[in-house]
Amino acid sequence: MSFMDVPFLPVRPDSPVAGMLAATFDGNFDAYIRVLYQKVATLLDLIFCNTEGHRGCHVASFEQWRDWVYSCQVETDL
């Protein structure tokens, strides 16, 4: 599995969504999420620490964190 592109995009201030982490990868979604959880947990905690329901990668198990990610996921046509 390799990441092709992983930008973090700020969204308009009047939007209900403050930012979007968009990723292009060539593998299973769970495998991609596990790599993020294992490799960049501290960065993700800094980015999402004020997000509703986020417990932090260092507090939540992988399964709890993955379920939180699923609950925040929004499909787009981008």
Image: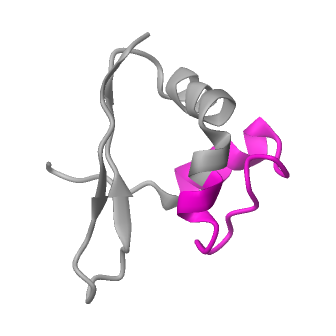
As for residue 52 lying within the magenta part, the answer is yes
Q: In which quarter of the image is residue 53?
A: bottom right
Q: Looking at the image, which residue is at 39% across and 13% down?
A: 2
Q: Which residue is drawn at 58% across and 48% down?
A: 43
Marker count (numbered): 0
In the image, is residue 33 above or below residue 53? above
Q: Residue 29, percent across and down?
A: 48, 28
Quadrant holding the N terminus:
top left
**Residue closest to the far top:** 1
Residue 25 image-quadrant placement: top left
Q: Does 75 lie within the magenta span?
A: no
What residue is at 53 percent from the left and 60 percent from the top?
47
Across and down, in percent, residue 28 comes to 47, 19
User: Which residue appears farthest toward the bottom when viewing the image?
Assistant: 14
Q: Out of 67 and 41, give the one closest to the viewer.
A: 41
Q: Where is residue 40 in the image (x, y as percent from the top left)?
A: 59, 36
Can you give x and y, in whole percent of width and height, for residue 9 in the image? 28, 58
> In the rendered view, does 25 fall on the left or right side of 78?
right
Q: Examine the rendered structure and indicate whether residue 22 appears above or below residue 27.
A: below
Q: Residue at x 58, y 50 (%)?
A: 44
- The image shows residue 53, relative to residue 44, as above or below, that is below
Residue reaching furthest to the left: 78
Is residue 10 or residue 16 the one in the foreground? 10
Colouring mode (rainbow / by chain / secondary structure / one colour): one colour
Q: In the image shown, does 44 or 32 lie closer to the viewer? A: 44
Please state the extent of the stretch shown in magenta in the rendering: 45-71
- Toward the viewer: 41 or 55? 41
